[in-house]
């Protein structure tokens, strides 16, 4: 039996699927994205249109369109004559993604220091406190969602349309899919992450609260670069490595 036939994962179904074609495609896209982010589909796993359509109770057309959109975002990858599969990430991908994040988010943080509201600052503080309270392995998913929201508030406060759009696209696959590609980070936070993340998040808040644009840019960039380096160091320990890709 070939590899493609062995996979039996399926996205969680929802009986409230809409009726119009555009909405059906969007609904299928959401279901597939959630299934991939939640680990129902693993990196390298093949996504067969007919099986997914049957599992979701839709025709193959919206599945095909949803997969094309996910491929354009880099969530899945297309292999000629083979089909679509969930994208896996290499250590080089990790390094590149963190460098891109550091560049764009630090620019956004600088701009945010001029526009961020007292309500947004209060939410950042509340999120930082919640993250500090949710550090157990059982709280991993919640912690990562709190972290995503923390960074989103900062870059949304920049009011820079292109930066916001680009960063929202990047965060659609980060960190859930990226971290899920490696055994060392799929189900737990990487080594000593909280020791560094908590004070660094507080430093980001202070810079924003003081309206110090240069400091906001610097601490945000350093936070993301350091986090990337710590993740790469974790991936090099033991036998943890990126999923192997077929030739």
Image: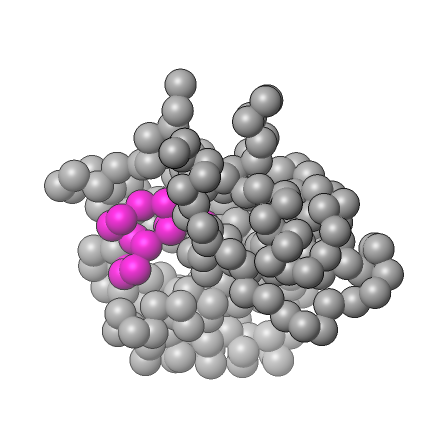
Front residue of 21 and 72 = 21
Front residue of 161 and 143 = 143
Which residue is drawn at the image coordinates 13% and 41% (left, top)? 238
Which residue is drawn at the image coordinates 54% and 59% (left, top)? 11
Residue 125, relative to residue 190: is it above or below? below
The secondary structure that dominates the magenta segment is helix
Q: In the picture provided, is 213 more to the left or to the right than 157?
A: left
Which residue is drawn at the image coordinates 50% and 73% (left, top)? 124
Q: Residue 166's x, y, as percent?
A: 65, 45
Q: In which quarter of the image is residue 235?
A: top left
Q: Is residue 188 magenta?
A: yes
Q: Farthest residue to the left: give it.
A: 238
Residue 123, relative to residue 203: is it above or below? below
Q: Residue 187's x, y, as percent?
A: 30, 60
- The region drawn magenta spans 176-189
Front residue of 196 and 114 = 196
> Where's the C terminus, which quadrant?
top left
Looking at the image, can residue 1 be seen? Answer: yes
Q: Residue 42's x, y, as percent?
A: 41, 48
Q: Is residue 201 magenta?
A: no
Q: How is the image coloured?
A: one colour
> Where's the N terminus, which quadrant?
top left
Residue 19, relative to residue 104: is it above or below? below
Q: Quadrant of residue 13?
A: bottom right
Q: Farthest residue to the front: give it.
A: 1
Q: Farthest residue to the top: give it.
A: 247
Looking at the image, can residue 219 be seen? Answer: no
Count of numbered circles on the image: 0
Q: In the picture provided, is 61 more to the left or to the right than 182?
A: right
Q: Residue 158's x, y, as percent?
A: 65, 58
């Amino acid at each position: 039996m070939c590899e493609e036939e062995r996979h039996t994962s399926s996205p969680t179904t929802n009986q409230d699927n809409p009726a119009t074609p555009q909405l059906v495609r969007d609904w299928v896209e959401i279901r597939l994205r959630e299934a991939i982010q939640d680990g129902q589909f693993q990196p390298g796993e093949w996504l067969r249109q007919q099986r997914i359509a049957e599992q979701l109770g839709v025709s193959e057309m919206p599945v095909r369109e949803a997969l094309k959109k996910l491929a354009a975002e880099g969530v899945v990858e297309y292999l000629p004559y083979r089909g679509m599969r969930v994208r896996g990430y290499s250590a080089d991908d990790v390094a590149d993604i963190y460098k891109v994040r550091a560049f764009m988010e630090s620019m956004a943080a600088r701009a945010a220091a001029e526009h961020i509201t007292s309500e947004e600052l209060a939410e950042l503080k509340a999120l930082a406190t919640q993250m500090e309270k949710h550090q157990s392995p059982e709280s991993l998913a919640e912690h990562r969602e709190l972290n995503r929201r923390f960074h989103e508030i900062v870059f949304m406060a920049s009011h820079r349309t292109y930066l916001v759009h680009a960063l929202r696209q990047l965060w659609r696959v980060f960190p859930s899919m990226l971290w899920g590609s490696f055994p060392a980070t799929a189900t737990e936070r990487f080594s000593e992450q909280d020791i560094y993340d908590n004070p660094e998040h507080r430093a980001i808040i202070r810079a924003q609260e003081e309206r110090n644009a240069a400091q906001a840019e610097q601490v945000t960039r350093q936070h993301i670069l350091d986090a990337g380096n710590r993740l790469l160091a974790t991936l090099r320990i033991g036998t943890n490595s990126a999923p192997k890709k077929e030739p």
